[in-house]
Image: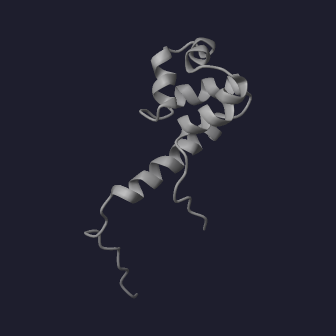
Amino acid sequence: MIVLTNPSHPGEVLKDLFLEPLDMSAGALAKRLDVPRTRIERLVDGKTGVSADTALRLSAFFGNTADFWMNLQHAYDLAEARDHVDLSGVRPLEMEAA
């Protein structure tokens, strides 16, 4: 099993792989996606995550899939949780022999 230990925030991917090569600002993208400018600015700044609504809009604009954006968010969220959630008090289920 492959576990990404340090996946990029979806906003970083959006900025580095999509906006910068197009020389497009977050505000310009927001206008094209018909969303508030602050939604994309906060995403690019890593202050908020990708919602399903935003994923659908990004996929329609860039010609990829909403799953691409949601999977980036999912991987990032799990990595963050692994770094911050204390599981030491969780005891695994023990199955009794039949």
The residue lying furthest to the bottom in this view is 97
**Measured along the vertical axis of the image, is residue 73 above or below residue 37?**
below
**Measured along the vertical axis of the image, is residue 59 above or below residue 96?**
above
Which part of the image, by quadrant, shows the N terminus?
bottom right
Which part of the image, by quadrant, shows the C terminus?
bottom left
Q: Where residue 37 appears, x then y in whole percent? A: 50, 15
The answer to which image quadrant residue 66 occupies is top right
Q: Where residue 69 appears, x then y in whole percent? A: 60, 37
Horizontally, is 64 left or right of 42 in the view? Answer: right
Near-viewer residue (36 or 17) = 17
Residue at the (29%, 68%) spot, across then down: 90
**Measured along the vertical axis of the image, is residue 5 above or below residue 53?**
below
Q: Where residue 62 appears, x then y in whole percent? A: 71, 27
**Measured along the vertical axis of the image, is residue 23 above or below residue 88?**
above
Residue at the (57%, 12%) spot, across then down: 34
The answer to which image quadrant residue 68 occupies is top right
